[in-house]
Image (cartoon, grey):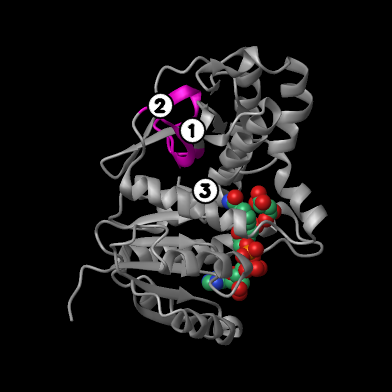
Amino acid sequence: MTTNATTITVTGAAGQIGYALLFRIASGQMLGDDVPVKLRLLEIPQAVRAAEGTAMELDDCAFPLLESIEVTDNVHHAFDGANVAMLVGARPRGAGMERADLLEANGGIFGPQGAAIGERAASDIRTVVVGNPANTNALIAAAHADGIPAERFTAMTRLDHNRAVAQLAQKTGATVDDIDGITIWGNHSATQHPDLSNATVAGRPATELVEDTWVRDEFIPRVAKRGAEIIDVRGASSAASAANAAIDHVRDWVLGMVPGAWTSAGIVSDGSYGVPEGLVSSFPVISRGGEWEIVPNIEIDAISRERIDASVAELISERDAVRSLGLIRD
Ligand code: NAD
Ligand code: LMR
């Protein structure tokens, strides 16, 4: 039987995010309940058996939309004909590792994966990098993917965005559906800027409903450091919420968004809002016609400007570090 199945490659498939992600993709929650999917699970050799166990469980769900599952440790096979690549697997920071060591170790993963995407993926490939440091890993992958427009490589900041929406909804007693106009700027790291200066709550400016001190002393640090807070409380990094955000990101990118709403995504900068061209930075975005577009003409207040510049400075230093390691060209 030939179908128009979408081929989705998930790396790090045996990890905790992979386990929270794959069943939702296979059930149709990402691309819709009328789109058959073929899953390719990429793992390192030591984790292939665990990924095979996950594949067995996927079989056991008898998902009507799941056409096939393949588990592989071959990066070229993994991305052959892929329409969507979700790059989750990454090298975590180990004891005694400096930031440069982490960037180098991940460059050794995301460079070859980007190259394989360039050689083997389908022409409509869309890639989201979840594995940290996500923005710079996306930059590295894009730089190695010959023939693929850099715009097809993105980094996930949707989890930060969803966290910001939830915090504002809880503070104001609103529902998450009432919140619009929140932006995550910059890097997926503690330097990010969660910005509610243009947000509305059921149509009212959020700044009229919450105090400046709450924004400065609670909202911004809580959202920016939420990843560390989850690790502290849960004893492991966020997994189901990260998988959920990855699904939100890909669904909106492929299927489009409700008109008028915006979200946040790490995309290649076109120079907007003073972010140097070529950096993968989080922006306010809408998805239209299968492409992310930066929301134009947003007012940036002085506090936001300072914080965006600081996060962008971190992205520049990560880019310069991977450049000096020879992981991207000048
Ligand atoms: P995990 O350690 O449970 O799983 C990672 C998996 O990746 C492992 O199974 C490992 O074998 C695999 N892997 C390592 N190198 C690989 C390679 N070269 N090819 C294929 N697979 C490879 O980690 P996790 O909790 O699933 O998190 C994965 C990544 O996502 C981490 O880098 C984490 O920091 C990041 N993360 C990002 C966000 C975000 O918002 N962007 C949120 C949460 C976690
Ligand atoms: C998160 O934001 O939850 C993660 O990026 C944290 C981490 O370091 O894995």
In the rendered image of this protein, does residue 10 appear above or below residue 2? above
Q: Which residue is mark 3?
A: 156
- What residue is shown at x 57% (from left), y 58% (from top)? 131
Q: Which mark is residue 258?
A: none
Q: Count the marks: how many? A: 3
- What residue is shown at x 54% (from left), y 54% (from top)? 244
Residue 305 in the image: state x and y as whole percent: 60, 19
User: Which is nearer the eye, 214 or 94?
Assistant: 214
Mark 3 crowdedness (10 Å alpha carbons): few <14, some 14-19, many ≥20: many
Q: Indicate whether residue 272 is drawn in magenta.
A: yes
User: Which is nearer the eye, 38 or 35?
Assistant: 35
Q: Disc 2 versus disc 1: distance between alpha carbons?
A: 8 Å
User: Image quarter for residue 219?
Assistant: top right
- What residue is shown at x 47% (from left), y 23% (from top)? 273
Q: Which residue is mark 2?
A: 295
Q: Can you name the residue that lies furthest to the left here?
A: 2
The reply to whether discs 2 and 1 touch (Cβ–Cβ < 8 Å) is yes
Q: Which residue is mark 1?
A: 283
Query: Which residue type does callout 1 highlight?
Result: Phe
